[in-house]
Amino acid sequence: MSVDSAYRTATLANGLRVVVAPEPQLHRAHVALWSRVGSRFETRGDNGISHFLEHMIYRGTRRVPSAHEVNLAFERLGGSLFASTQVDHGIFSLTLPPESLDRACALFGEVLSQPAFLDIDIERGIVLEEILEDLDDEGQQVDADNVSRALIYDEHPLGYTITGTEAHVRAFDEKTLRTYHTRHYTTENAVLVFSGAVDAERALAIAQRDFGGLPRGERVAAEPPPRTQKAARLRIVESVSSQTDLRVCLRAFAETDPMRPALDVLMRVVDDGMSTRLYHRLCDARGLCYDVSAGYDRYEDDGVVDVAAGVQHKRAVLVTGEILAMFDELAHDGPAADELDTARRRIVWDTRVLADSPEDTAAFHASGALFGRSETPEQHADELLRVTADDVCEAARQLSRPERLSVVAVGLLEGGEGARLADVVKGWTGAR
């Protein structure tokens, strides 16, 4: 590819990795700290602490002692704060006018490194409300994503919820939060990235000034999940709703697996717009549902391909069968020439438009540095463009196996629909 995305990397004296990706054509700057934190680094006894800590960090410091004052200080500088806890990483970021970068980063570094853990009980109430969003009136877990991950990973932390349980959240105190912050928010577990309208030399100087005091710490380890599944799995959760929330999941490949590029292209063929195979098959051609989507969650040592659909209860069996048949076809025949051509065109386009978003640029570089994928967007695109139809077919063949399949249906499957769904799932032979 001819697109050039110049960026710089550096390591501060304290060990913090810094990436600077200037995009001088833009009118906003972005800075983000990515860290190895999340439910996969937790235990059954402290599950939810990463997410709760994320909430507490923006509660303020001793000098800026409230969430309101923190938000006001950044917003007066034109900035917008963001934070997110995922399964295997946490993000704190700030998007702002470039002229505010110096002042805002000084505060950003203070907030992330010196949380005062104020108003714990107020934030506890907020998180408890968030947990309730995934439960029914009887306290049963009805979030299909949470149910599917628990089905796939059993007791491994990749099967935990991000928010944890009510009992855990009620038990978290300042001492526990400080201990966890000290362990995870260290230079061995973090990457700092600047993107957008930033000057590389100035950004590195700011990084040293505002994050040079972070402790080095030790890199937190992640226990690889076992592969003990021998046959397809199914879980039906009875829930009173207008539709069944369906998940058809296939245990996939890790971020660094040699099959990962082919799987990336396979997912483009499956779902990269409303003209691609999944949406066309289920929605346009058969009218089986209003919306359906597919995603690939990749971890450093594992992965999951996940097809999600909201369907009429009586159509859950049919939709599941159609999704599995789609993977069967790709495993036997691979993608059509026009599908692969469209996927390649969109790979090139998406790489070009990455330069329009400092947030997406930061995410690309930060995730790569955090999880050992050292490449430019152009190198990543070139890797995908080398994937052939046979490569995609092979990825689908390796993916389409009963011992990789887990299906979750959250809804009302009555009149024998649950038994029929079990027949479809258990009877699927995959690409054999």
Image (spheres, rainbow, N blue to C red):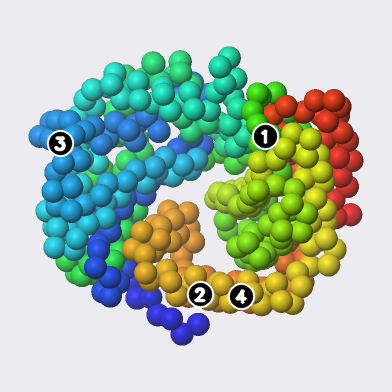
Vertical placement of residue 294 versus 66, above or below: below
Indicate left or right for 339 with 186 as reference. right
Determine the CA span between mark 4 and mark 2.
9 Å
Residue drawn at x 30%, y 50% is 93
| Of labels 1 and 3, the one closer to you | 1
Indicate left or right for 15 with 372 as reference. left
Circle 3 is placed at which residue position?
A: 69
Toward the bottom, the furthest residue is 2
Towards the viewer: 286 or 171: 286
Circle 2 is placed at which residue position?
A: 349
Q: Secondary structure at mark 2?
A: helix
Q: Secondary structure at mark 4?
A: helix
Determine the CA span between mark 1 and mark 3.
43 Å
Residue drawn at x 77%, y 45% is 319
Determine the CA span between mark 3 and mark 4.
47 Å
- Residue type, numbered disc 1: Gln
Q: Secondary structure at mark 1?
A: loop
Circle 4 is placed at which residue position?
A: 344
Residue drawn at x 63%, y 39% is 225
Badges 1 and 3: C-beta atoms under 8 Å apart? no
User: Percent position (x, y) of residue 95?
Assistant: 26, 55
Tell me the crowding category of disc 1: few under 14, some 14 to 19, or many 20 or more residues within 10 angstroms, Cα based: many
Mark 1 or mark 4, earlier in chain: 1
| Of labels 1 and 2, the one closer to you | 1
Towards the viewer: 185 or 343: 343
